[in-house]
Amino acid sequence: MTADEVDHFVAPARVFSRQHALAVPAPVPARPGVYGWWFRRWPSPIAADDCSRHRGLALLYVGISPKQPPRNGRPASKQNLAERIRYHYTGNAEGSTLRKMVGCLLADEVGIQLRRVGSGSRMTFGAGEQALSAWMAENALSAGWSAGPGGEPNG
């Protein structure tokens, strides 16, 4: 990203609530790009003093979609910004590092616990995923950045 693109990213024109990000059609572009999560309130163990701030929100998480292709020969992810942000709002901790991190930090406050599901290594908050989704709907907003036609940022 160029310096101008970074400036746009840390001061987005729009951030999207859960309701807006899940709307059809999605306001977040269905293209590869970088996304950030801005929080009204964050889990108390996090010291957000040095985080980027914008309109009273703190930038606590940045991701890229799709991620780099795996080196083990498995197929590359085909997700885009819209799909990834949707998953962070509606998925589970196994498929979302953001949900896993926030959920673990909020475990006592929200009354949830990360647990193994089934006989494998899959970890989720089980029924607590709904409580985590509700907390995120109230406190987490997303913003995506993707170079549009002509290199213009959008989202």
Image (cartoon, helix red, strand yellow):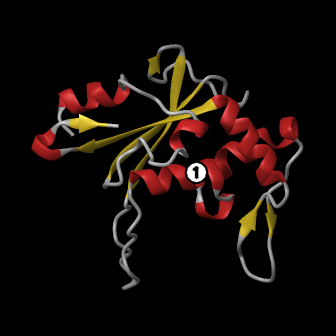
Residue furthest left in the image: 150
Above or below, 37 against 47 in this view is: below
Q: Could you say which is closer to the camera, residue 51 or residue 83? A: 83
Question: Would residue 132 be found to the left or right of residue 70 on screen?
Answer: right
Q: Quadrant of the N terminus?
A: top left
Q: Please give the name of the residue rendered at 47% of the width and 57% of the height, measured from the top-left corner.
A: 83
Task: Give the percent coordinates (x, y) of residue 145.
Answer: 32, 40
Which amino acid is tagged 1? His
- Of 26 and 120, nearer the camera is 26
Q: Residue furthest top?
A: 56
Q: Quadrant of residue 71?
A: bottom left
Kindly identify the residue that appears in the image at 48 percent across and 14 percent down: 55
Most extreme residue toward the front is: 24
Per the image, the residue denoted by label 1 is 88
Residue located 17% across and 36% down the image: 152
Residue 129 in the image, given as x and y percentages of width and height? 77, 53
Left or right of 56 in this view: 93: right
Determine the residue positioned at 43% across, 51% down.
82
150 w.r.t. 79: above or below: above
**Helix, strand or loop status at disc 1:** helix
Please name whichever residue, 18 or 78, is drawn nearer the observer in this view of the structure. 18
Give percent across and percent down for residue 5.
23, 32
Residue 66 located left or right of residue 107: left
